[in-house]
Image (tube, rainbow, N blue to C red):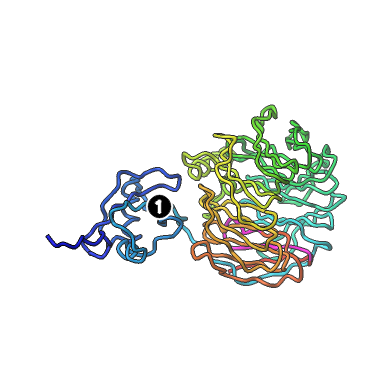
Amino acid sequence: MDSQAPPPAAATDANTSVMCQLVSPEGDHLGAALYLPQNVGPPQLQEIVNHLLHNEDKLPYAFYIGDEELSVQLGTYMQQKNANVEVTLRIVYQPQALFRIRPVNRCSATIAGHTEAVLAVSFSPDGKCLASGSGDTSVRFWDLDTQTPLFTCKGHKNWVLCIAWSPDGKHLVSGSKSGELILWDPKTGKQLGFPLMGHRKWITAVSWEPAHLQAPCRRFVSASKDGDARIWDITTRKCVISLTGHTNSVTCVKWGGDGLIYTGSEDCLIKVWETSQGKLVKTLQGHGHWVNSLALSTEYVLRTGPYDHTGKTYSTAEEMKEAALARYKKMRGNAPERLVSGSDDFTMFLWEPTISKQPKARMTGHQKLVNHVYFSPDGQWLASASFDKSVKLWNGITGKFVAAFRGHVADVYQISWSADSRLLLSGSKDSTLKVWDIRTHKLKQDLPGHADEVYAVDWSPDGEKVASGGKDRVLKLWMN
């Protein structure tokens, strides 16, 4: 035998196979480890995963080793990384959307109408209608076909701070700086009944009960500067439950798919409530300053209820409820619903509230307060917007940092995802919108055009349009 020791098993010999373990995004092994030839790349891995999962309809997958997407054959990867073939390669497969959303790249309409700053914009669950709320005290509905104002809804006495569509698309609720809530009919623009009174200070957020739990949608929850959250029933027009316990302003609220309500507050706490009697289930502690924003991993399917990118319509509430439940179950899988909180303490926490009071991960890196957090529609990613001028991307399951998107030159106020989870939109104090590519971690599109700060952005669920509003009082629509 040669006196020299043999070189370590490097991936240079084309005949050497690579030992691979396929793993789901949640960390579950898909079968046993496999010896795969070095010429296997993403297309062959796709075949293998579809086969092992017994998918009758072949699904597209992306593959990750560590936090890096695998885009080459295994042999090439091993050479690039100078990796040892004797160590099992852990490959995470991630399901991708079957459809593709093109990035918006031009402003298709600048619509005047509001006489003060636009503070909120929101597309309907089916993406066919758009609503906005403004400092001029009005709510407006916009005709997306003609790109003109449809209804101007007057009824509030003060700034309209937040708006929310019911997941079945039949109602819009708006909350104002005076503390009242008004329900609107999007088909006519008419106010439905008297304003809902009860909060003593301004409304900070509104969230509807998911359509898979109740259709037609009847209940929503509002959060207020007065320290309370209230559940309202739109058929009786009454506050049915008051959620009291926070000692400071409630800044955000989410109604989860399991029927629990999550509230975040300036008392640094997150509280979890059940919704039949309004009992406090648990308190999540950890933040050292105000909680500004909450997001749920299932938020996108909860917001859109029965509606998806295909544009399918429903004739009965029962059909809607079934479709919404099927979408929710498919998106959630066997994993628990995850919650993320963003704070004035510059950090975020990832929680699995149904499983533990302890956070799953603490996410640090922002240099200033975290203003908005949002999971991608497929729940695989998480984005955060901060006053440090950056948007950061994190793994939505583990909370691990992935990338920082830099390009804005002032505070980033709000973010929104494309329906296929491949693109992220941000709006900033610097008067621009920017579209970021999740795969390449690069700026895909720079969208200047507003004359002043951009407060509100939304990407329509059908993927075709983006709306933005801000200090310059105009509503802008962007298309591809």
Residue at the extreme front of the image, as rendered: 3
- Residue 11 spot, x, y in % from top left: 28, 62
- Residue 377 spot, x, y in % from top left: 55, 52
Given the image, on which type of amino acid does mark 1 rest?
Tyr
Q: Is residue 79 left or right of residue 206?
A: left
Figure label count = 1
Q: Is residue 52 above or below residue 412?
A: above
Residue at horizontal 53%, vertical 64%? 441
- Residue 126 spot, x, y in % from top left: 60, 52
The quarter in which the N terminus is drawn is bottom left
Residue at the extreme left of the image, as rendered: 1
Residue 194 highlighted magenta (yes or no): no
Residue 462 highlighted magenta (yes or no): yes
Q: Is residue 470 above or below residue 169?
A: below
Closer-to-camera residue (125/158): 158
The quarter in which the C terminus is drawn is bottom right
Residue at the extreme right of the image, as rendered: 157
Residue at horizontal 64%, vertical 67%? 478
Classify 10 Å Cα crowding around label 1: few (below 14), some (14-19), many (20 and above): many
Q: Which residues are magenta?
A: 458-471
Element under disc 1: strand
Closer-to-camera residue (314/363): 363
Q: Which residue is mark 1?
A: 93
- Residue 90 spot, x, y in % from top left: 37, 51
Q: Is residue 9 left or right of residue 433?
A: left
State the image quarter where residue 274 is shown: top right
Q: Is residue 102 above or below residue 314?
A: below
